[in-house]
Image (spheres, grey):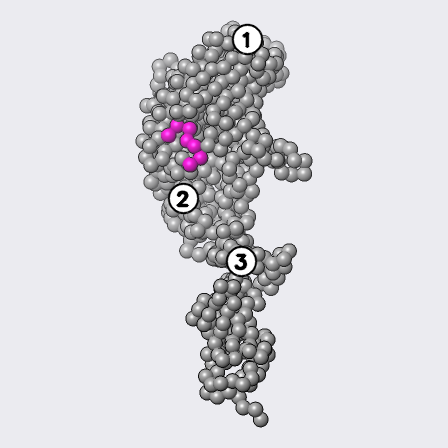
């Protein structure tokens, strides 16, 4: 170990946690490893010495690196190395980013990079909360300006008992999974998936998490006192007081008048005219200071909106704080897809489609988790035209992946099991237009299209995005239901998304832009969100309130049955010869699982029935007392071998299984020669009278003449 090596120990959720610094990555601005059990994560943070030129945002980059070696796996693909981050890694990166971002100085435009790497991963100890802790420690002990530390914890609930950082078995058995991050004084981020739990239960989980967070922050503060270094002093540009006073005195009255317009289109036109007028007014007076003047005008707009909301309860579009924009819904809009739904709320509109497939169509996963596949997939697309932008299409980014995952998490608790509904399910949200809360519109649209497709979901799910305006000086708060994009940008201190059924919550995602939230605000926001959710569900139910009784004629019909796993090889055949022949003859799709489950799919039920019968014929095992129809295949001096061709109900059998009718069982009277009764190719009815330990089958001819045929 180096001379700078330090280690610190604490306990989280009853498990020992070890923090080590100074033994790896000596050049990074801040670095540490966090170990719990056999899970080890490494966090490194670095800092750009100069502000990035030409930006008006904080360029924070967070990457969670899932290394396949950490779970003893070699990556797939041709190159056999880790490539582009998977969805799970991207979602974890967002999870780390959100509580950190509000704690950097406002106006700091220096690049900050946070990289968390999984070095070793034990299945029972998730690396995500440890990565969140490690990133906070690395930033806190570095010279990067950061108003931390933050603590992070996952809360599960098993048999009614809340559990801190649950293990694999507890996660599987639990009915909620709530990730919470914050400082010692406030909550910064909540991310939750739950099985229709109450608002009170979610709040209890968040508050328990905050108590644990306080302990983590205290632990980190002891580390900072021992090894932390002074923070860099930043020179953050400050708007000239004289310039600001001059612009405010001229522009405020015009801005306030423009923002009185509640129609979004007319308001944008009014704003555009005012912006141009103000720019022209000061063009000659303050040369080359356009960006500063524009920033002052934006501040006036923000202050105007916030003031109207806090003092009058009036929002940019004229709504009150609890009002929800007009909603209309439609299902079955697209004739050839398996299910479709349109959900429109104000100017936000989502067209969602549902596609059903066989379980073999499930998404294959390659990450460090134990999950190998995903049966339900929700994909979210936000094209440029949805916001009126003129730019080329790009592949889904972190935002799109995050919104899709949120909607997916919201719907998962109400989906039927594989046994109840043996389908892979994909829903796709195409955002037609967006003015706030398109992710929650995606939840609503998915619920509509799933029901339209005939997926037997337990209950409809709706989502709503809540906003917050909080006055720093007075502490006065306004909670906003169904926030607009403009409110989120100019006046919103919180984006709190809540999805659920009439019974309870299924998903939460909370982003904070201020120092954090306390319990009373979260409690009030949850209550107001429930009120809004009930309103939305009522309107959705007027369009469709339960799943369609039948699937679309274009959707595959799937039959599932079980066979003896030992017989799978007989159905598949050498090199797939047998199963491919069945598929070719019937035109169906067939999937066979290792446990003996067979799935046969086609839009034609007659073809499914034919394929099923062929498979059953291949794997059938006769039992003593059963009757069959068979064809005489061979004749010996002592009897006839009969190949089974149909069961007692006339259902065809195949597979070449046969039994023997001894000459004494061919007829009721003595038979001299086997050929006196049967010949090769004859169709006979037989009964199984014995199966020996080697599987050999003895038969009896049950359609016997009173006398054997006589020689001529």
On screen, 612 above or below 494? below
Question: Which residue is at 49% across, 57% downward?
Answer: 564
| Helix, strand or loop at mark 1 | loop
- 430 or 90, which is in the foreground? 90
Q: Which residues are magenta?
A: 163-169
Depth check: give the residue in front, 589 or 53.
589
Q: Kindly report which numbered mark, 1 or 3, lies closer to the viewer in this rendering.
A: 3
337 over 432 or under it: above or below:
below
Residue 638 is labelled as none
User: Is 332 drawn above or below residue 175 in the view shown?
Assistant: below
- For the point 55% across and 72% down, the residue is 643
Disc 2 versus disc 1: distance between alpha carbons?
A: 50 Å
* Residue 335 visible in the snapshot: no
Q: Label 1 belongs to which residue? A: 232
Q: From this viewpoint, which residue is outermost toward the bottom? A: 712
Left or right: residue 652 versus residue 577 is: left
Q: Nearer the viewer, residue 107 or 253?
A: 107
List the residue tagged with mark 3. 567
Which residue carries the number 2 mark? 414
């Amino acid at each position: 170990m180096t001379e700078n090596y330090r280690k610190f120990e604490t306990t989280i959720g009853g498990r020992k946690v070890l923090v080590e610094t100074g033994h790896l990555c000596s050049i990074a601005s801040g670095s540490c490893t966090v170990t719990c059990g056999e899970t080890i994560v490494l966090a490194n943070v670095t800092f750009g010495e100069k502000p990035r030129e030409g930006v008006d945002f904080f360029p924070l980059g967070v990457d969670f690196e899932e290394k396949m070696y950490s779970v003893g796996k070699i990556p797939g693909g041709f190159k056999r190395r880790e490539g582009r981050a998977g969805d799970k890694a991207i979602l974890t990166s967002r999870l780390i980013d959100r509580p950190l971002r509000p704690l950097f100085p406002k106006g700091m435009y220096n690049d900050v990079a946070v990289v968390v790497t999984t070095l070793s991963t034990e299945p029972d100890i998730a690396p995500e909360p440890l990565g969140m802790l490690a990133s906070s420690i690395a930033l806190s002990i570095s010279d990067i300006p950061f108003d931390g530390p933050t603590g992070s914890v996952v809360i599960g609930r098993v048999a009614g008992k809340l559990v801190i950082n649950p293990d694999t078995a507890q996660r599987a058995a639990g009915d909620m999974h709530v990730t919470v991050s914050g400082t010692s004084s406030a909550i910064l981020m909540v991310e939750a998936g739950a099985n229709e739990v109450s608002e009170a239960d979610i709040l209890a989980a968040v508050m328990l998490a905050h108590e644990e967070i306080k302990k983590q922050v205290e632990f980190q503060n002891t580390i900072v006192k021992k090894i932390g270094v002074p923070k860099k002093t930043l020179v953050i540009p400050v708007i000239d007081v004289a310039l600001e006073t001059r612009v405010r005195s001229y522009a405020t009255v015009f801005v306030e008048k423009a923002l009185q317009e509640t129609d979004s289109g007319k308001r944008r036109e009014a704003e555009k005219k005012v912006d141009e007028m103000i720019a022209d007014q000061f063009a000659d007076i303050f040369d080359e200071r356009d960006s500063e003047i524009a920033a002052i005008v934006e501040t006036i707009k923000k202050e105007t909106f916030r003031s109207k909301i806090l003092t009058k309860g009036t929002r940019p579009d004229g709504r009150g704080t609890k009002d929800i924009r007009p909603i209309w819904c439609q299902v079955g809009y697209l004739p050839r897809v398996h299910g479709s739904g349109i959900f429109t709320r104000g100017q936000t509109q989502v067209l969602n489609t549902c596609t059903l497939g066989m379980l073999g169509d499930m998404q294959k996963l390659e990450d460090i988790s134990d999950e190998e596949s995903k049966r339900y997939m929700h994909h979210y697309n936000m094209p440029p035209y949805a916001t009126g932008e003129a730019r080329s299409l790009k592949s889904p980014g972190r935002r799109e992946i995050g919104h899709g995952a949120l909607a997916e998490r919201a719907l998962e608790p109400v989906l039927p099991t594989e046994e109840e509904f043996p389908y892979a399910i994909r829903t796709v949200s195409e955002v037609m237009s967006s003015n706030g809360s398109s992710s929650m519109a995606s939840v609503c649209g998915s619920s509509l299209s799933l029901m339209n497709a005939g997926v037997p979901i337990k209950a409809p799910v709706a989502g709503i995005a809540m906003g917050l305006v909080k006055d720093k000086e007075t502490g006065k708060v306004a909670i906003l239901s169904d926030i607009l994009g403009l409110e989120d940008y100019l006046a919103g201190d919180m984006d709190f998304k809540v999805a659920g059924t009439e019974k309870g919550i299924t998903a939460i995602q909370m982003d904070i832009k201020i120092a954090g939230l306390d319990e009373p605000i979260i409690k009030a926001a949850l209550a107001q969100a429930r009120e809004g959710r009930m309103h939305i569900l009522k309107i959705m139910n007027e369009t469709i309130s339960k799943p369609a009784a039948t699937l679309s004629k274009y959707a595959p019909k799937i039959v599932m049955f079980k066979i003896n796993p030992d017989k799978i090889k007989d159905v598949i055949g050498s090199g797939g010869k047998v199963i491919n022949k069945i598929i070719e003859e019937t035109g169906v799709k067939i999937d066979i699982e290792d446990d003996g489950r067979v799935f046969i799919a086609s839009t034609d039920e007659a073809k499914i029935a034919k394929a099923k019968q062929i498979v059953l014929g291949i794997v059938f095992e006769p039992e003593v007392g059963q009757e069959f129809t068979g064809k005489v295949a061979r004749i010996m001096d002592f009897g006839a071998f009969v190949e089974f061709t149909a069961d007692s109900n006339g259902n065809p059998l195949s597979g070449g299984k046969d039994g023997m009718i001894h000459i004494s069982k061919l007829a009721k009277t003595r038979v001299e020669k086997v050929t006196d009764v049967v010949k090769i190719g004859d169709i006979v009815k037989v009964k199984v009278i014995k199966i020996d330990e080697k599987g050999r089958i003895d038969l009896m001819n049950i359609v016997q003449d009173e006398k054997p045929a006589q020689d001529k």
